[in-house]
Image (tube, rainbow, N blue to C red):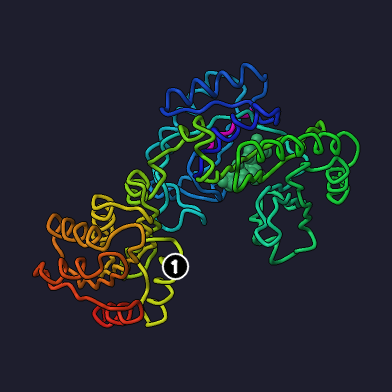
């Protein structure tokens, strides 16, 4: 699960991570008032307005509704007077809120901006990169750092891998002080900047561990003109399976940022990921779901989704899964591949029929059932009069649905 930058910064500051003074706004008037108040509190004359969407690249993004306005997802306003600052920010927020921001990370469809973050501008001396993520190969968290802040890290890794530094975090003891000092040295930091960086990085590692993040990314992490390190941007992705330990984080979810079908699926306890192929797949068990996708690909098809209805599913959940698949306009055919271990095949069959009765069936449907009560399940499907094609094994089922979708 992802959260917004302003939420990430609030969470991180409770770990003592330094972030710019800021406030979130949902309306133009709130944005204007927040900007004026930031200016009064800091005595500075520059304030930043940042679109809050679950995607990066905002600094170089543009708004569909305002193509020539020179308006990006991150904008700076300078003014000597708080009243003028308030007016300018109200105007800017008016344009940004409700408009569609397109960045390299949103894809061409972009994302609608529903909130903005107002922040005191920082006088940047140096932009760095820091991330904490899991290295699945060594099964440990790692700290990644680079001098190339503000640049996409994939680009740094591809073009100048020598500028990417890694420290492995021991899950039992955490990161050790010498590792952070070594990292600061490799980044060329000295004096106050080095000690401030070490302190910030230590707090970020602690936050990532306690919050169960899959990814914590600070890009850029900046050193300001007086040598202090601070998080200028913040991205946090949480491990979904650990969210039960963090009810306060689960409450930060913004459903308007998620694929609507994925929200429906999550609430029904289904594990669904939308893909861009043509064959809808409904499977029980993540391993079987992946094998099914591979088999469909093997016969020349492309899966429209990953859908694991779970090992102990019921009729209602199967019906919900089926409705989600049929609602996807890209779907040209459906392949149901179920191994009835804990769940019984007749329950699956009834769920499929209940859903087809409700939503109708306008595309070919191949069903392969195996396991407990398989005979009963197959009979229910065969006697349904829906023209469902039965397959006796996975390869045959995949081959049939690919042929039928051609
Ligand atoms: P992203 O493009 O979505 O990753 O958004 P960021 O929060 O990283 O902002 C993009 C860029 O805007 C940063 O890399 C900075 O160069 C610039 N920026 C953001 N905040 C400030 C600020 O307070 N002062 C200055 N000078 N630049 C800023
Ligand atoms: Mn950034």
**Residue behind mark 1:** 290
Q: What segment is highlighted magenta in the picture? A: 46-50
In the displayed structure image, the side of residue 120 where residue 199 appears, left or right: right
Magenta stretch, main secondary structure, is: strand
Q: Specify the quadrant of the image occupied by residue 289.
A: bottom left
Give how far across and how far down residue 306 sits, in percent. 39, 62
Q: Is residue 72 visible?
A: no
Mark 1 residue crowding within 10 angstroms, few (<14) / some (14–19) / many (20+)? some
Residue 85 position within the rendered picture, expressed as x and y whole percent measured from the top left: 54, 24
Q: Which one is nearer the viewer's eye here, 339 or 262?
A: 339
Q: Is residue 192 above or below residue 59?
A: above
- Up-down: is 154 above or below 17? below
Q: Residue at x 67, y 20 (%)?
A: 42
- The residue closer to the viewer here, 186 or 263, is 263
Q: Exactly how many numbered labels are in the figure? A: 1
Is residue 245 visible to us here?
yes
Across and down, in percent, residue 93 comes to 45, 33
Residue shown at the point (16%, 68%) measured from the top left: 381
Question: Which residue is located at x 52 percent, y 18 percent?
Answer: 83
**Residue in front for this viewpoint, 294 or 338:** 338
């Amino acid at each position: 699960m992802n959260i917004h930058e302003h939420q990430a910064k609030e969470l991180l500051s409770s770990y003592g991570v330094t972030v710019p003074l800021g406030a979130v706004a949902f309306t133009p008037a709130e944005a204007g008032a927040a900007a004026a108040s930031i200016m009064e509190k800091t005595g500075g004359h520059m304030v930043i307005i940042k679109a809050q969407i679950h995607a990066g690249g905002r600094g170089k993004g543009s708004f569909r509704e305002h193509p020539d306005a020179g308006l990006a997802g991150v904008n700076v306003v300078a003014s000597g007077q708080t009243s003028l600052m308030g007016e300018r920010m109200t105007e800017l927020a008016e344009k940004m809120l409700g408009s569609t921001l397109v960045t390299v990370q949103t894809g061409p469809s972009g994302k609608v901006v529903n909130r903005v973050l107002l922040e005191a501008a920082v006088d940047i001396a140096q932009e760095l990169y820091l991330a904490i993520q899991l290295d699945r190969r060594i099964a440990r968290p790692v700290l990644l750092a680079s001098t190339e802040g503000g640049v996409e890290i994939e680009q740094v890794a591809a073009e100048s891998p020598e500028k990417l530094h890694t420290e492995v975090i021991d899950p039992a003891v955490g990161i050790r002080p010498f590792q952070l000092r070594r990292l600061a040295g490799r980044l060329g930091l000295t004096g106050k900047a080095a000690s401030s960086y070490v302190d910030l990085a230590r707090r970020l590692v602690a936050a990532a561990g306690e919050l169960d993040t899959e990814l914590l990314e600070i890009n850029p992490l900046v050193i300001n003109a007086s040598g202090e390190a601070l998080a200028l941007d913040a991205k946090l992705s949480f491990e979904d399976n650990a969210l039960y330990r963090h009810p306060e984080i689960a409450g930060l979810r913004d459903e308007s940022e998620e694929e609507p079908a994925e929200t429906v699926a999550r609430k029904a306890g289904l594990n669904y990921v939308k893909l861009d192929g043509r064959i809808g797949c409904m499977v029980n068990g993540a391993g079987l779901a992946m094998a099914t996708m591979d088999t469909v690909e093997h016969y020349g098809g492309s899966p429209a989704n990953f859908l694991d209805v779970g090992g102990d599913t019921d009729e209602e959940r199967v019906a919900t899964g089926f409705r989600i698949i049929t609602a996807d306009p890209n779907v040209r055919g459906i392949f149901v591949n179920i191994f009835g271990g804990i769940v019984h095949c007749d329950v699956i069959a009834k769920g499929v029929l209940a859903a087809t009765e409700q939503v109708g069936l306008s595309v070919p449907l191949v069903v392969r059932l195996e396991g407990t009560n398989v005979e009963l399940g197959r009979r229910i499907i065969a006697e349904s009069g829906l023209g469902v094609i039965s397959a006796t094994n996975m390869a045959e089922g995949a081959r049939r649905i690919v042929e039928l979708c051609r």
